């Protein structure tokens, strides 16, 4: 069995540990400096090992990394470059969930000389959204517009933000403040977060969407010179964006991130009753005609291995576990920087973890046409 080290025992790290330890193919060690989080994890998932670790301490990290197949970073985005460097130095594959653009760029530079795989951005957005979008893009002769929309929303909103905390508060604040990559009229640009507000409906429900940072992953590089317009926006219920602009800009809490984090975590409860919305729309020319194809999906919270998990936990953890599985199976490059769009959509959806993105156990043959999942 492959030995895996997960750094971070939080909302997503716990589910990654559950999925991998339960499948029978991985020996899992979870490391965190929070003894209480490790204690809860050890009680719930006895088939794994826990280690108290301050990941800032390189001398403590090195012995835990010894003989591991992969390091999975499920800690805050600020740890990404440090842990990627430690994994590369130890000859260990590296995966993370970061939406932080600067961290992903530093890992890409580090990967040029690495003997193992360094694969950041393995979650939902960035992550799965790039896989679905790239699959649609391959069906066009020339591309006009690629629009990617993702939201993790409470099913029963009950506050002025119409939002509940479902994942990293640090990551949420980061993506609401940092510049957003896009391609506009064929030119790569940085757009301000929280801007370009739009409204749309899906399955009879109304939403708003606006710029947030990091969701495109590496698609700006991959599609540069091929697409006229490429953008990513986060989906929320109506009114959320305006309240966040008040907090971040008018009250200047964007300049005091630690205080804003404390306020949000003290006032906004976590919910397990959520829905993840994924929407990709691609238009372009095919066989001389202007065509459009769309991928839309809603994933809800449910029980996995006897424990209720939120939709954002399920989708984020399953996406990373799928990437790990595909590397083990030889379906990804064996070294260097690996992009999300290097994963074939069919490979992802027919993977045992990727099937958590299916509807009622059935998945179309592609991101746009009907049919049952093919046996690989």
Image (spheres, helix red, strand yellow):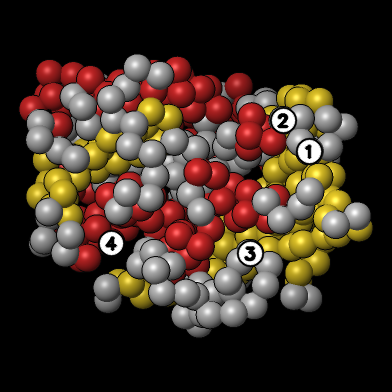
Disc 4 vs disc 3: which is toward the camera? 3
Residue hosting label 4: 19
x, y percentage for residue 200?
82, 61
Mark before the other along the chain sequence, 4 or 3:
4
Give the spatial CA distance, label 4 vs label 3.
25 Å
Give the spatial CA distance, label 3 vs label 2.
22 Å
Measuring 10% from the left and 35% from the top, which residue is drawn there?
67
Measuring 68% from the left and 26% from the top, which residue is drawn there?
179
Residue 59's place in the image compared with 146, above or below, is above
Residue hosting label 3: 367
Residue 227 got which mark?
Answer: 1
Mark before the other along the chain sequence, 1 or 4:
4
Q: Residue 169: in sight, yes or no? A: no
Q: Tag 2: Cα neighbours inside 10 Å, few (<14), some, or many (≥20)?
A: some
Give the spatial CA distance, label 1 vs label 2.
6 Å
x, y percentage for residue 195?
79, 37
Q: Are marks 4 and 2 in contact (CB under 8 Å)?
A: no
Give the spatial CA distance, label 4 vs label 2.
36 Å
Near-viewer residue (171 or 74)? 74
x, y percentage for residue 8?
28, 41
Q: Tag 1: Cα neighbours inside 10 Å, few (<14), some, or many (≥20)?
A: many
Q: Are marks 3 and 2 in contact (CB under 8 Å)?
A: no
Residue hosting label 2: 224
Mark before the other along the chain sequence, 1 or 3:
1
């Amino acid at each position: 069995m492959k030995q895996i080290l997960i750094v971070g025992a939080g909302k997503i790290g716990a589910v990654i540990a559950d999925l991998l330890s339960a499948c029978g193919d991985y020996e899992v060690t979870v490391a965190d400096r929070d003894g209480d989080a490790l204690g809860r994890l050890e009680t719930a998932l006895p088939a794994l090992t826990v280690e108290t670790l301050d990941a800032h301490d390189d001398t403590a990290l090195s012995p835990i990394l010894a003989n591991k197949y992969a390091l999975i970073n499920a800690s805050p985005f600020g740890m990404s470059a440090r842990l990627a460097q430690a994994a590369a130095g130890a000859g260990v594959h590296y995966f993370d969930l970061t939406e932080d653009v600067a961290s992903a760029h530093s890992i890409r530079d580090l990967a040029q000389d690495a003997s193992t795989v360094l694969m950041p951005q393995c979650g939902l957005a960035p992550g799965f959204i790039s896989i679905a979008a790239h699959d649609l893009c391959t069906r066009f002769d020339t591309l006009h517009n690629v629009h990617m929309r993702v939201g993790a929303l409470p099913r029963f909103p009950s506050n002025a933000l119409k939002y509940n905390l479902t994942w990293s508060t640090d990551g949420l604040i980061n993506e609401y403040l940092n510049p957003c990559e896009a391609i506009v009229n064929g030119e790569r640009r940085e757009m301000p977060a929280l801007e370009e507000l739009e409204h749309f409906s899906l399955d009879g429900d109304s939403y708003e969407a606006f710029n947030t940072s990091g969701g495109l992953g590496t698609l700006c590089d991959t599609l540069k010179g091929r697409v006229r317009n490429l953008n990513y926006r986060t989906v929320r219920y109506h009114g959320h964006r305006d309240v966040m602009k008040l907090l971040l800009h008018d009250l200047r809490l964007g300049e005091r991130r630690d205080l804003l984090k404390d306020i949000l975590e003290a006032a906004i409860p976590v919910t397990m009753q959520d829905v993840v919305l994924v929407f990709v729309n691609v238009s372009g020319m095919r066989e001389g005609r202007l065509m459009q194809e769309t991928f839309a999906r809603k994933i809800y919270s449910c029980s996995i291995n006897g424990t209720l998990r939120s939709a954002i936990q399920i989708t984020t953890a399953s996406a990373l576990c799928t990437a790990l599985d595909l590397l083990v199976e030889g379906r990804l490059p064996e070294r260097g920087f690996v992009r999300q769009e290097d994963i074939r959509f069919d490979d992802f959806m027919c993977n045992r973890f990727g099937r958590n993105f299916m509807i009622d156990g059935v998945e179309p043959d592609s991101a746009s046409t009907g049919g049952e999942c093919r046996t690989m």
